[in-house]
């Protein structure tokens, strides 16, 4: 509970991102925090949005599946690190229904995003 509250309410972006890293480190055991993690997709800080994508990918399962549409929306984020984190998280969650959107990133201007998209497509056997 307390870590999830930090994810969405602490004034310092570094603390919010670190809290998300803790949630991600717990993985499936943090399933009850998936909603708080997804709420961080709208954070103003790039590091927090990217950390939230990674954390949701680590949580996995049905808890994460409930937020796939919101996660996929991050594929269009203005920041490359967020787009890449979203592609990686979708791959980790085996969200192949978003393969077309991930495939669009194969032509991204940023090399790290292209790499994340390529890895996702390979993971899905595409």
Image (tube, rainbow, N blue to C red):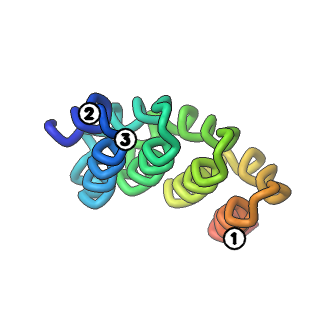
Q: CA distance from mark 3 to mark 2?
A: 7 Å
**Residue at horizontal 66 percent and vertical 45 percent from the top:** 97
User: Which x, y percent locates residue 82?
Assistant: 58, 48
At label 1, counting other C-alpha atoms closer than 10 Å, the crowd grade (few under 14, some 14-19, many 20 or more) is few
Q: Which residue is mark 2?
A: 10
Along the horizontal axis of the image, is 37 left or right of 23? right
Using the rendered view, name the quadrant where residue 73 is placed: top right
Q: Which residue is mark 1?
A: 122
Looking at the picture, tell me which residue is in the foreground, 20 or 14: 14
Sequence-first tag of 1 and 2: 2
Looking at the picture, tell me which residue is in the foreground, 6 or 32: 6
Using the rendered view, name the quadrant where residue 109 is placed: bottom right
Q: CA distance from mark 1 to mark 2?
A: 37 Å
User: Which x, y percent locates residue 38?
Assistant: 42, 35
At label 2, counting other C-alpha atoms closer than 10 Å, the crowd grade (few under 14, some 14-19, many 20 or more) is few
Image depth: mark 1 or mark 2 in front: 2
For the C terminus, the quadrant is bottom right
**Residue at horizontal 43 percent and vertical 43 percent from the top:** 48
User: Which x, y percent locates residue 23?
Assistant: 27, 51
User: Badges 3 and 2: C-beta atoms under 8 Å apart?
Assistant: no
Q: Which residue is mark 3?
A: 13
Helix, strand or loop at disc 2? Answer: loop
User: Badges 3 and 1: C-beta atoms under 8 Å apart?
Assistant: no
**Residue at horizontal 65 percent and vertical 39 percent from the top:** 77
Sequence-first tag of 3 and 1: 3
Helix, strand or loop at disc 3? Answer: helix
For the N terminus, the quadrant is top left
Outermost residue to the front = 12
């Amino acid at each position: 509970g307390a870590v999830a509250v930090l994810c969405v309410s602490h004034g310092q972006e570094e603390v919010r991102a670190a809290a998300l890293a803790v949630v991600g480190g717990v993985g499936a055991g943090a399933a009850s925090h998936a909603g708080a993690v997804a709420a961080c997709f709208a954070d103003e800080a790039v590091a927090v949005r990217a950390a939230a994508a990674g954390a949701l990918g680590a949580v996995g399962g049905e808890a994460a599946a409930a937020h796939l549409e919101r996660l996929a929306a991050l594929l269009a984020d203005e920041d490359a690190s967020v787009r890449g984190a979203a592609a990686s998280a979708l791959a980790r969650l085996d969200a192949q229904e978003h393969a077309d959107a991930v495939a669009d990133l194969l032509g991204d201007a940023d090399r790290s995003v292209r790499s994340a998209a390529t890895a996702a497509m390979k993971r899905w056997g595409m």
